[in-house]
Amino acid sequence: MKEKQEKYNLPTGWSVATIEELIDGKNGIFKDGDWIETKDQNPNGEVRLIQLADIGDGFFRNRSDRYMTKERALELNCTFLKKGDILVARMPDPLGRACVFPYSEEEKYVTVVDVAIIRTEQNGVDSSYLTHFINSPVIRKQIEELQTGTTRKRISRGNLSTIKIPVPPLNEQIKIAYRIDELFSALDQAVLSLKKMNNQLKIYRQTLLKNAFEGKLTESWRGENKSESSENLLKQIENERQKRYDNELEKWKTIIENLKNGEKKPIKPKLDKQLSINKSDYISFSNIPNNWRLTKIANISKVGTGTTPLKSRTDYYKNGSIPWVTSGALNNWMINKPSTYISEKALKETNLRLYPQNTLLVALYGEGKTRGKCSELAFDSTINQAIAAIVQKESEEKLRKYLKFYFVKNYVELREQAVGGAQPNLNLGIIENILIPIPSSNYEINLITDELDSQFSIIENLEETISKSIIKSDIIRSSILKNAFEGRLVEQDLNDEEAIELIKRNTIEKKKYLESQKKKEKIIKKKPVKMNKGLTIEEVLETSEKPMLSSDVWQQSKHKNNIEDFYKELKKIQCKIVEVKKDNKSLLSLVK
């Protein structure tokens, strides 16, 4: 005992043991759940099938909705779960997570083969203590070292059974588990408050944006200052667009007049779009100030897009020096680096256009929450076809930050305008026709964007603080567990019975129980059959004239209590086995 304490640096009265040594010698169990196939399930059954999705990291999730009849569960000799059973997920994520089963109904629940069941029972270790230990960083590290598989990681029950667990006296186990629950509960409440605060900040951000674009942020300024109508600003933008067009048209005419034979005729410039605004458009904007006016994105900017140069053309990418951006880069406020680079040849031979620095970009489609995101170029760049580019010049540029905030406010509404089936997309027409309220002047626009900048900065700082605090709570949680399993969480009572005595009792009880079972078997004197000796998979299949259900092969083989060994043997003899799928059932037979 003293050697163990020195080797594992254990406190006085503690010992180390495997899971098998910590469960009640007579009534405790440590086994895998049951192999239950789709054919065994019945949505009208009264027995619920607890699955991996139900196993949380220290808590029961209650997510699954699969059932089977009690009759079928008894036919398969399923293990019915009891309140207080420890369920260990033998597959991610995370691998090896454990929780205590909370329901008390008898013969109402079974679990799947990838969940290990630990039932400590009356004379075993405290189940709450053992669950906390299994979920501790110490055992997680050991599980990671013992995991098998490449694409689908798993921990076998055999490997779980090799892990040595530090065990305090029973009274101390109960104290430790209670103290951990107490501290974790306080942490959970703190994290819950932080997450609630985070949600409140999101609501405040949206309220701030709503007030900004309804003129409420500048309401007092308008009351103290006589402001003109935004019609003047919009008219100024329209005049500038007309003037730019006239200048470009004159240049084009000059080029045409001096065009020599054989020279390519340049494309005639077009006047920027000017989309009309109807009285009905104002119905949804009844809350804006009287001197604000509505316009559309196309009336205050030029909307374009890009393309993806052929990936098969390596010369379009090799030694590229021109930035190229995809929609995945639009998740940040500013785009500070390109997705990749393309060559000068790609720019010349495709429909790509080099958009200037500060161009606003909107994701037309993309994975997850990308569609509808708005960002801004920090450099000149080309883009792909999943992005709309919003280019502004002269007076239009003064609306850029205001417009950017407007896209943030309307993110959800914009996403809902997407069209299409499996993957709904936005398009340039939708972007061009977005209605936007324009304040009375550039001065009022600056007041709004400055206030939003200031408030957003405060919100982001608070969100960062909250995020760090939540991360810190995980560190504190790990520290609590570390202290608990080093004997530094609760005060020790040297009068408590040492843990080694509990382990000895369980070992003796198990030995007695196994001996009594052997005596019963001798009394019954069943006629020995080959199956009792333990058949290999191949031997089981040889006894059958027709293909067998894989679950039946498992139950009749020597591996019926260890699914991992069944899988191993199946893999070794796969060249001798034929598997046939019929009505969602897996049938096995030997190659003839």
Image (cartoon, rainbow, N blue to C red):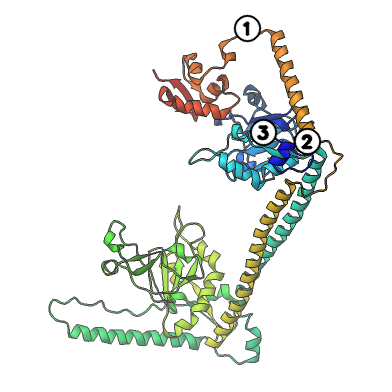
- Location of residue 275 in the rendering, given as x and y in whole percent from the top left corner: 43, 76
Real-space Cα distance between discs 3 and 1? 32 Å
- On the image, which quarter does residue 287 sit in? bottom right
Relative placement, left or right, of 157 versus 26 is left
**On the image, numbered disc 2 is attached to which residue?**
499
- Residue drawn at x 73%, y 31% as measured from the top left: 23
Instruction: Please state the horizontal and vertical placement of residue 448, each as a whole percent of the image.
Output: 58, 81
| Amino acid beneath label 3 | Ile
Examine the rendered structure and indicate whether residue 315 appears above or below residue 532: below
Res. 26 visible in picture: no
| Residue type, label 1 | Lys
Callout 2 touching callout 1 (CB < 8 Å): no
Return the residue found at the far right.
Answer: 495
157, above or below 237, in the image: above
Camera-nearest residue between 500 and 404: 500
Q: Secondary structure at mark 2?
A: helix
Q: Residue at x 78, y 51 (%)?
A: 182
Indicate the secondary structure of the residue bearing disc 1.
loop
Q: Is residue 85 visible?
A: yes
Dot 2 alpha-carbon crowd within 10 angstroms: few under 14, some 14 to 19, many 20 or more: many
Foreground pick, 326 / 468: 468
> Helix, strand, or loop for circle 3?
strand
Marks 2 and 3: which is nearer the front?
Answer: 2
Front one among 79 and 249 = 79
Kind of residue indicated by mark 2 = Ala
On screen, residue 362 versus residue 477, left or right, reads left
Label 1 neighbour load within 10 Å: few <14, some 14-19, many 20+: few
* Farthest left residue in view: 261
The residue beneath circle 3 is 117
Whole-number angstrom distance, CA of label 2 to CA of label 3: 23 Å
Give whichever of discs 2 and 1 has the lower sequence position. 2
Residue named by callout 1? 527
